[in-house]
Amino acid sequence: MMAVGCLFLLLLGSGGAKANSASVSTELSKDVEINSSVPVDVTERTSAEALLEQLTHTKLSKAAALLEQLEQSGDVRVRAVFQTMLDGALYYQRDNRQLLAVRKGEDKSLNASDVFSGESLGVVAKKSVKKIRVNNRLRVYLRGALSRLALNADSADDRNIAVMSMLDKLSADNVAALQALDERETNHEVKVSIALALAMNTLATSSDRDQRLAAIEVMDGRLEAPVKNQLRALVDSAVVDGSIVNSSLDTQVIAAAQKALQNIDGKVTAYGYVEQLFFGLSLGSVLLLAAIGLAITFGVMGVINMAHGEMIMIGAYATFVVQQLMPNFLEYSIWVAIPAAFLTAGLVGVLIERCVIRYLHGRPLETLLATFGISLILQQAVRTIFSPLNQTVVTPEWMSGSLEINAVLSITYSRIYIFIFALIVFAALQLVMKKTSLGLQVRAVSQNRSMAKSMGIHTDRVDALTFGLGSGIAGIAGVALSQITNVGPNLGQAYIIDSFMVVVFGGVGNLLGTLFAGFSLGIANKFLEPATGAVLANIIVLIFIILFMQKRPKGLFPQKGRAAE
Amino acid sequence: MSTPSSNSMNRLSHTVGKYRLPIKPTSLFVLVLFTATLLASMANLWVPADSAFHVSTYTITLLGKYLCFAMLAMAVDVVWGYCGILSLGHGAFFALGGYGMGMYLMRQIGDRGVYGNPELPDFMVFLDWAELPWYWLGMDNFGFALLMALAVPGLLAFVFGWLAFRSKVTGVYLSIMTQALTYALMLAFFRNEMGFGGNNGLTDFKEILGFDLQADSTRVSLFVITAVMLALGYVVSQFIMNSRMGRVVLAIRDGEPRTRFLGYRSERYKVWLFVYSALLAAVAGALYVPQVGIINPGEFSPLNSIEVVVWVAVGGRGTLYGAVIGALLVNYAKSRFSVVMPEGWIFALGALFVWVTLFLPKGLAGWAQDKFFKTEEHPSEDEPLSSDMDTPISHSAKGAS
């Protein structure tokens, strides 16, 4: 909370510094440039200044009036002052009455900073500053005032957010502020939001039937929680067991409210499905990424690589190491991490192939055991080199946060990027397998090893490269996974069984089947989850695959023709 | 039955080479086992504690645990070594047997639990359960509990095997499916709602059939019973493998399609062998729990099941005594190693996997046979493994079409 407050202050502060000398007229404009070019209005400036100075003298009981005056003054710095005050960090210097933002450091020292610019002013002595006290009543006022002040924000989006945040606190003051904004507002979106807020106010306060009906019409189909709550409260107050019993309320209004509520519920449910679908696709893309490398080593080469999960882990640790190496360029580290992870995991893969797997050719069960041993060694190596604990991998700024589509549906950016990334990796791999000579050779070897060999293909080389490619892709999956899960020695284990399921379900040796299987298992999992809980959903999917394997032992899309033999 | 490996057991029993054994290996195995058990038990009970020959109760319990593991390894060997079914989920049958016994022991606690509820085990009281779930009913009866501890894993093995072998799922597919099975069970048993104590499992046992579980005599008795059961399991398994069914099972391992073409319903043999093996594992689990004093979902973890496979691989698959020796050796090494350098153990275990598969494909037993009992009749030992192992993966799916 504190950090958010600081950030907020910082942003405000820098904005304030830009327009520091320029007083901002109450007239609101979208354009920042206009604001800063307004000539300095000396009287207003001094009045705000004077009020701020007065703040250091007044008693707690009289502060409210002063704050109201400040709010009225329209000075752009007032927001910063209010926010600091709300945080309980507004102090003033005893000797020159200058306002300071003071926050306690870890060692209880008082770190002062400029209220407006957030610029650090160093540690101050406890005796030299005095806190401006706030009580609960003032805090309530400050919160309201801050949201009202936010209505004057420069960007239309910020204004919209401010309006939306007022929906559940429609006090008379707030309504007045909204009405004032409505008159001068030019942005369509903001106007729609204001209309919604005012409609809610009308429904709550007016007793005129037509007005209330009109208000409900405006509210119909809106997904914001306060809208739904208000309608629900209205309906609940009048309806028992489906019939309207409270005759003091207008039946027509209640019926309209009921209908609007149904509409809203319907929409919420629909968006709920959309959200589940997205979660499913997101899980599917993770499964796809984890399984696709396996689809090559297991499907194309016929090698059971139990150390596949550890290749993913290596990729994730490569991301971690890259971030440690370039702490100042975290934003771009991911572009270094992807090739680094591919190369590291790929190299380890080639090593494993050269040292162990090639001696076990054609003995899949033994390969399984040997690679399992390797996976144990790799895990323990990571525990020894790094630590048994999870490591922190920083998510770059542009990948954090979420895309808000409406009040009930928001999608995190990291998952969107991983979804896209999984598709890109898949497409690239498909391209390699279908269009390059390496891909051609790999397919030839997987179909008929001895024939390929007699055609002059270096099967040993192809084996090593294929295994390296599969492992490298797993490493890339590790980069993606490092953004959404914990990076620890057990990272790979969590995915190995799921990955096998995806490959087997999709049909061995079929990359497209893997794609399809990954997404369908992901979606199935997420749609089962609300009804059964995550663990049971996982179990059900596992049992389903076990049963499915009885029916179609070759998966959804079995290989056909001579390749299948 | 011309494959050299398939009668490796027999070869040892009627050894032709210069080192003829004076005694059949089955009798030898039983004899060694009983002598060791007897000596250890006597050393614990009658030798004074300060004597150099005294065996501590801790050691007895440890030995009992090893013998349970040996039995589990034997169960895996029966299906893997003799039938080529690599089960990566035998830990599931072991754990289910253990849970059956655990439920009985849990009910025996009665009102001596922390909450003092005579009906409900502690964890159910803790979770606010009003009454005993139906599947806990009757588990306070030792006979019934034992029956359940065998019936449930047996039934599971039957259903799973029947489904899998009927659709001719073989090779790695089967291995991965068994792994998925034990993984799914692990997830399920971790849930508190299942009514098996969730994460903590079942523990704090007090007594079995009225005997205090902490008493030396009970411990020794359990150890002796385990040894007897292991010997019994060994004799029965040996009998099965020497019977007509065992011959067919070996034939299936070495060439399932051919066996089928000869008119044998291979899936039936496999299902029954699988069920027998699961029962063996369940008995081991049921004996394991009272000695160790706890059973939790960790026993279902795929890693445990794979470890069992390694014991068998180290000892030498296709020879029952090899599985037993492997289990004892690896577990002894584990006990010693993980005390001295806990980190090193994982490295060693991993290296063991790789080393055994690369350099010791027939395990210690096979190596010893090659070294000491090499016969003139089999001058060249080629790859002793089943056709499943020799054929690339696509083969496994071929039979299904």
Image (spheres, coloured by chain):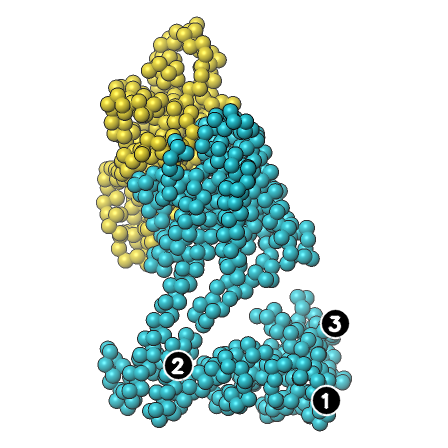
Tell me: residue B274, above or below residue A391: above
Residue B365: give x, y in percent of width and height: 44, 19
Q: Secondary structure at mark 1?
A: loop
Of the two numbered discs 3 and 2 in the rendering, the one whose residue sits closer to the viewer? 2
Chain ID of residue with mark 2: A
**Residue B55: % across, % down:** 45, 27
Q: Which of B279 and B33 lies nearest the eye of the viewer? A: B279
Cα separation, mark 3 vs mark 1, equals 31 Å
Residue A182, can we see it?
Answer: yes
Callout 3–callout 1 Cβ contact below 8 Å: no
| Residue corresponding to mark 2 | A219
The kind of secondary structure element at disc 2 is: helix
Residue B346, position in %: x, y?
53, 36
- Residue A438 sits above or below residue B231 on the image: below
Figure chain in cyan: A
For mark 3, name the chain. A
Q: Quadrant of the C terminus of chain B?
A: top left
In the picture of the structure, the residue carrying the numbered disc 1 is A40
- The answer to which image quadrant residue B141 occupies is top left
The reply to whether residue B47 is in sight is: no
Q: How many marks?
A: 3
Chain B: give its colour: yellow
Q: Residue furthest right?
A: A95
Q: What residue is shown with label 3?
A: A122
Rendered location of residue A21, percent (x, y): 73, 84
What residue lies at 66% left-to-right and 66% top-to-bottom?
A: A106
Q: For the residue carrying disc 3, how many other residues have a C-alpha within 10 Å: few (<14), some (14-19), or many (20+)?
A: few
